[in-house]
Image (cartoon, helix red, strand yellow):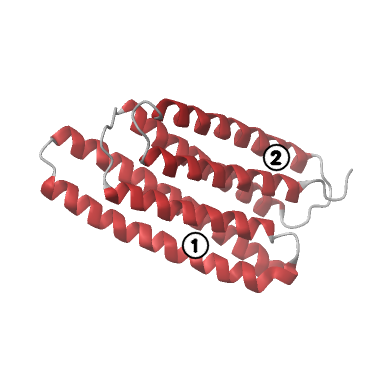
Amino acid sequence: MPREGRFFDYFNAHAEQVALASEQLVALMSASLDDMPAIVATIDEIETRADKITHDTVALLHTTFITPFDRDAIHSLINTLDDIVDSIQDVAEGISLYNIRRLTPDAVQMAELTHSCTVRVKQIVSLLDSMEHASDILRTCREIEQLESDVDRVMRSALSRVFRDEREPLQVIKMKAIYEGLEKISDYCEDVSKVVEGIVLENA
């Protein structure tokens, strides 16, 4: 059996899809109605690529005798990365299915904050192949946790504003779903940071 396999290649490839998907989500927030379908389709393609990477990683895990770190941590990391992309796809499809024609500044801000989270997720994953980067990884994990708190704060304000100011009940329901979906993306980013932090603390 192979000693380690190409786990770090798969982690980096998946984290790249995470960052690409969130970048497309930010673009979707300011896109015209005519451009939205193409962006949603691009996110769907990214999600398909991410799914394949997840499948290949799990398959490799089953055929590798000695892994670079704990097997459960490998499984948790790749699946939580996949959760981020799935959540981004859910938000994008929600915007399309709900036929949302006007996204709020709060939604745009939340999307930008979640993109900042995913960029940092990509950073910590790229550094994971060497415990010499432990301090940089842990510092970036703390940044992800702070950004997740920022997303929570913006969401609370956004929900308060939409319930107070929005006159169309259907728009309230739609935006509540979008806000909650965006918040879930940041939650999964924080989950990745916790998995990575655990790996570092155990192996550094």
- Horizontal relation, residue 133 to residue 25: left or right: right
Residue type marked 2? Val
User: Is 166 drawn above or below residue 201 in the view shown?
Assistant: above
Residue 204 seen anywhere in this rendered image of the structure: no
Residue 180 seen anywhere in this rendered image of the structure: yes
User: Quarter of the image containing the N terminus?
Assistant: top right
Residue tagged 1: 144
Q: Position of residue 41 (x, y in %)?
A: 49, 27
Residue type marked 1? Ile
**Which is more N-terminal, label 2 or label 1?**
2
Q: Position of residue 202 (x, y in %)?
A: 68, 68
- The residue that appears at 79% across and 46% down in the rendered structure is 6
User: Is 10 drawn above or below residue 95 in the view shown?
Assistant: below
Q: Position of residue 109 (x, y in %)?
A: 35, 53
Are discs 1 and 2 less than 8 Å apart at CB? no
Q: Position of residue 134 (x, y in %)?
A: 67, 70
- Marks 1/2: CA distance? 26 Å
Query: What crowding class fits label 2: few (fewer than 14 Cα within 10 Å), some (14-19), or many (20 or more)?
Result: some
- Horizontal relation, residue 135 to residue 164: left or right: right
Report the disc number at residue 58. Answer: 2
List the single residue furthest toward the bottom.
Answer: 135
- The residue that appears at 62% across and 46% down in the rendered structure is 16
Q: Nearer the viewer, mark 1 or mark 2?
A: 1
- Horizontal relation, residue 60 to residue 37: left or right: right
Q: Nearer the viewer, residue 110 or 193?
A: 110
